[in-house]
């Protein structure tokens, strides 16, 4: 009788040990796979962040160039020249809008500069 109980206890302990080892191996495999994908996605996020930083630099440079160009007085007052100047101002505002959208998608409190309304455009 005692040997039967001891045998049953040993068999149940073997099953528990087998299932705990199996569970630990499965959890280790899941942890390794999760770590791989976390590393892979972090590399993607870092590369996107670098690309956004470079894009911000380009947009900022083009915005400054357009602002300098639009500050110069024009000496020819034809409708075509005025339309071209207005197109340049809208392009400048579009660059600023894109930069603000990108900045707000990263940091909700970041606003680069306010876009001028159409009443300020000559």
Image (tube, rainbow, N blue to C red):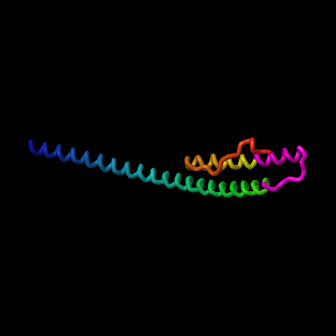
Looking at the picture, tell me which residue is in the foreground, 109 or 114. 114
Name the residue located 69 percent from the left edge and 49 percent from the top edge.
96
x and y, in percent, of residue 50 in the image: 60, 57
Task: Give the quadrant of the C terminus.
Answer: top right
Task: Give the quadrant of the N terminus.
Answer: top left
Residue 79 sits in which quadrant? Answer: top right
Residue 57 sits in which quadrant? Answer: bottom right
x and y, in percent, of residue 20 in the image: 29, 48
Q: Is residue 86 magenta?
A: yes
Name the residue located 72 percent from the left edge and 47 percent from the top edge.
93
**Residue that extends furthest to the left in the rendered view of this protein:** 1
Residue 4 sits in which quadrant? Answer: top left
Left or right: where 54 falls relative to 2:
right
- Total numbered circles: 0
Looking at the picture, tell me which residue is in the foreground, 25 or 44. 44
x and y, in percent, of residue 74 in the image: 86, 53
Left or right: where 50 falls relative to 80:
left
Query: Taking 108 as reference, is 46 above or below it?
Result: below
x and y, in percent, of residue 2 in the image: 9, 44
Looking at the magenta stretch, what is its main secondary structure? helix
Left or right: where 76 falls relative to 52:
right
Looking at the picture, tell me which residue is in the foreground, 6 or 89. 89
Looking at the picture, tell me which residue is in the foreground, 9 or 120. 120
Name the residue located 72 percent from the left edge and 46 percent from the top edge.
94
- Magenta span: 71-90
Name the residue located 45 percent from the left edge and 53 percent from the top edge.
35
């Amino acid at each position: 009788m005692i040997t039967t109980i001891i045998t049953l206890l040993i068999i149940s302990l073997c099953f528990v040990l087998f299932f705990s080892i199996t569970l630990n191996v499965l959890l280790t495999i899941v942890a390794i796979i999760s770590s791989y994908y976390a590393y892979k996605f972090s590399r993607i996020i870092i590369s996107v962040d670098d690309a956004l930083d470079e894009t911000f630099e380009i947009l900022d440079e083009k915005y400054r160039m357009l602002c300098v160009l639009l500050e110069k007085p024009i000496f020819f007052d034809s409708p075509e020249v005025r339309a071209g100047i207005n197109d340049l101002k809208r392009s400048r505002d579009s660059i600023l809008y894109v930069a603000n959208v990108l900045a707000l998608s990263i940091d909700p409190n970041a606003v680069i500069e306010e876009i001028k309304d159409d009443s300020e455009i000559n």
